[in-house]
Amino acid sequence: MTHLELVKEVANKGDFTIKDTKDFMKALEETVSAHLRDDGGIKLFTGLVLTTKFVEEKDGRNPRTGEPLKIPAKYRPVARFGKALKDAVNA
């Protein structure tokens, strides 16, 4: 499903305009990004938790030249899925 298809489906199910739904989705994206950046986690819906995980600096290699390099430490977004969501997908 593409972003536009999601917007249209949510707009139809909720009886909203497509513009209002796009504005809501943009606000949701900005809010989730800000909380992940600042707090490190957010419970989006029942069964879906978004958090961040710290990844240490590590050694790497440029695949084109073979030259060794350092991959800097960073935070990586992580999604955890609850039992209810897993069961709904496999029903």
Image (cartoon, rainbow, N blue to C red):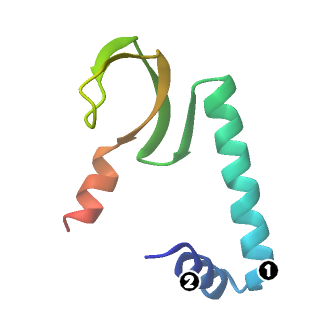
* Viewer-nearest residue: 78 or 43: 78
Within 10 Å of the Cα at label 2, are there few (<14), some (14-19), or many (20+) other Cα atoms? some
Task: Report the mark closest to the observer, 1 or 2.
Answer: 1
Query: What percent of the width, then of the height, locates residue 2?
Result: 49, 75
User: Where residue 9 is drawn, which disc sits there?
Assistant: 2
Query: What percent of the width, then of the height, locates residue 22?
Result: 73, 72
Quadrant in the picture for residue 35: top right
Q: From what the image shows, is residue 28 above or below residue 31?
A: below
Q: From what the image shows, is residue 18 above or below residue 32?
A: below
Within 10 Å of the Cα at label 1, are there few (<14), some (14-19), or many (20+) other Cα atoms? few
How far apart are labels 1 and 2 at the CA level? Answer: 13 Å
Q: Which comes sooner in the sequence, label 1 or label 2?
A: 2
Badge 2 element: helix
The amino acid sitting under disc 2 is Glu
Badge 1 element: helix
Q: From what the image shows, is residue 56 above or below residue 44?
A: above
* Viewer-nearest residue: 48 or 76: 76
- Left or right, 76 with respect to 87, comes to right
Residue at image x 46%, y 39%?
49
Residue at image x 30%, y 29%?
62
Query: What percent of the width, then of the height, locates residue 46?
Result: 47, 48
Q: The N terminus appears in which quarter of the rendering?
A: bottom left
Q: From what the image shows, is residue 22 above or below residue 38?
A: below
The amino acid sitting under disc 1 is Lys
Labels in figure, total: 2
Quadrant in the picture for residue 70: top left
The residue labelled by disc 1 is 19
- Left or right, 14 with respect to 43, comes to right
Q: The C terminus appears in which quarter of the rendering?
A: bottom left
* Viewer-nearest residue: 39 or 59: 59
